[in-house]
Image: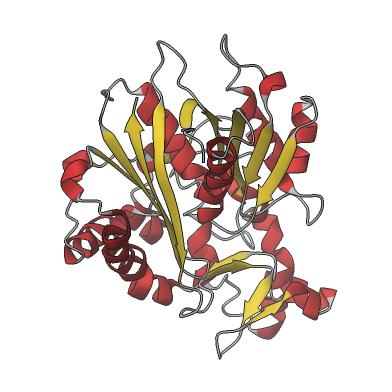
């Protein structure tokens, strides 16, 4: 046994280009079939996001960062008088949509950074993949396997949300049904929900003198895939019985016609189950496992995709006898958008820079994932 602890001793974020407001976002992403979206205003009214960021050049309309480049720039932002890239012993990187199937995302980030050889690992999934990356880094330090690890997460959702990405599918629909050549709601919905960005966290055995650090008490991840079918997915088609037909099982024409590579979400399934599974059920179990009580938590950092879920989440927490008043909640969704796996990193960076943290305060982080329903909780203490 050892007496090692692990602390978050640094944080960084990278958001590409200028903030994009609700009035200009469709022009930045590009119109689908030359038509304004019917769903956009409704979705934006519910999600409460006012600005977000896209890795799209505002002049040319072309992507100007890869996903790996976003992540590498966030990691590079950790460099200061106390830390250099050369000190990284372990680099773990997460994303929902890497730039390629192979090599792994972390290898591409490492290559872009150009720092010396180190252990690298990629974590896959959707939002919880960012927490899985942090858990890998945390356990590596906690076990004594290394002194310094970096966990990072990034999303470049705009690369598959641009209007031109849907042209083959729309062309097929025009042939089939000329009077309604529009995107299905489960695809159009996500165009107004997702955005780009990256965050990075430095994990070390000891705090840096004179700087705020966050001790990691524990990080738990639960999956409910044994009970739930896929809800958010890409590279596949969801069949009537709930199973997925993957992109490699069909030919290229079918992939184009049906928009296999677009991100899709079963909105009905999301609305019916996400807070019940990831809050009420998970918090009931978490209290039994960890003995945590809501009165111990000074700051609650919830990752949610839309302010539509804010009050519903609160009600689900109350059903688990875990009521944290919303005055103790911290979120930056309205200004930074929904950056998926990177959202909790960007929130933690903003909170650390806010000046509101005091030694001894505890922070509870909540990251749900609708991929096939999973959730991560993490308890931190200000050191």
Q: Is residue 96 above or below residue 249?
A: above
Indicate left or right for 155 with 113 as reference: left
Q: Position of residue 280 (x, y in %)?
A: 27, 66
Please identify the residue farthest to the front as the structure is shown: 1
Q: Give residue 339's position: percent from left, percent from top.
A: 51, 46
> What residue do we see at 43% from left, 48% from top?
219
Q: How is the image coloured?
A: secondary structure
Horizontal and vertical percent for residue 135? Answer: 53, 46
Compared to residue 78, the image places residue 251 above or below, namely below
Image quarter of residue 268: bottom left
Which image quarter: residue 160?
bottom right
Residue at 68% x, 48% y is: 122
Determine the residue positioned at 53% across, 57% down. Answer: 191
Q: Name the residue nearer the viewer: 328 or 117.
A: 117
* Number of numbered discs: 0
38 vs 295, left or right, is right
Nearer the observer, 238 or 18: 238
Residue nearest the viewer, comparing 75 with 157: 75
Q: Is residue 88 above or below residue 60?
A: above
Where residue 237 appears, as percent x and y from the top left, is 65, 78
The residue depicted at 31 percent of the width and 54 percent of the height is 290
User: In this view of the protein, can residue 369 be seen by the observer?
Assistant: no
In front of the other: 166 or 234: 234
Q: Please indicate, yes or no, whether residue 252 appears anywhere in the rendered image.
A: yes
Please indicate whether residue 62 sits to the left or right of residue 334 in the image: right
Q: Is residue 294 left or right of residue 213?
A: left
Rendered-image quadrant of the C terminus: top left
**Outermost residue, bottom side:** 241
């Amino acid at each position: 046994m050892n007496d090692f602890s692990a602390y978050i001793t640094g944080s960084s974020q990278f958001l590409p280009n200028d903030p994009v407001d609700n009035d200009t976002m469709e022009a930045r992403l590009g119109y689908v079939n030359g038509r304004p979206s019917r769903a956009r205003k409704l979705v934006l009214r519910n999600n409460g996001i006012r600005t977000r960021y896209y890795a799209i050049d505002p002049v040319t309309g072309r992507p100007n960062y890869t996903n790996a480049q976003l992540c590498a720039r966030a990691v590079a932002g950790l460099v200061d008088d106390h830390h250099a890239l050369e000190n990284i012993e372990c680099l773990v990187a997460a994303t929902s949509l890497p730039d390629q199937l192979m090599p792994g995302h972390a290898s591409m980030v490492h290559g872009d950074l150009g720092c010396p050889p180190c252990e690298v690992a990629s974590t896959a999934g959707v939002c919880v993949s960012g927490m899985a990356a942090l858990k890998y880094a945390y356990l590596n330090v906690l076990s004594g396997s290394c002194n310094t690890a970096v966990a990072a997460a990034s999303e470049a959702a705009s690369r598959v949300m641009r209007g031109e990405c849907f042209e083959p599918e729309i062309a097929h629909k025009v042939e089939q049904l000329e009077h309604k050549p529009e995107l299905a709601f489960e695809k159009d919905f996500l165009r107004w929900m997702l955005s780009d960005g990256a965050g990075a966290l430095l994990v070390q055995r000891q705090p840096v003198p004179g700087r705020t650090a966050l001790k990691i008490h524990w990080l738990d991840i639960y999956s409910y895939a044994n009970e739930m079918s896929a809800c958010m997915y890409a590279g596949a088609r969801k069949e009537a019985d709930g199973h997925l037909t993957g992109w490699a099982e069909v030919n290229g024409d079918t992939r184009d016609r049906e928009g296999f590579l677009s991100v899709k979400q079963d909105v009905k399934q999301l609305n019916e189950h996400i807070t019940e599974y990831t809050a009420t059920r998970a918090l009931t179990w978490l209290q039994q496992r960890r003995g945590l009580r809501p009165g111990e938590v000074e700051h609650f950092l919830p990752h949610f995709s839309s302010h539509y879920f804010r009050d519903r989440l609160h009600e689900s927490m109350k059903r688990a006898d875990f009521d944290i008043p919303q005055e103790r909640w911290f979120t930056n969704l309205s200004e930074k958008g929904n950056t998926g796996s990177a959202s909790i990193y960007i929130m933690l960076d903003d909170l650390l820079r806010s000046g509101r943290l005091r030694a001894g305060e505890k922070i509870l982080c909540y990251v749900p994932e609708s991929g096939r329903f999973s959730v991560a909780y993490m308890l931190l203490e200000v050191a």
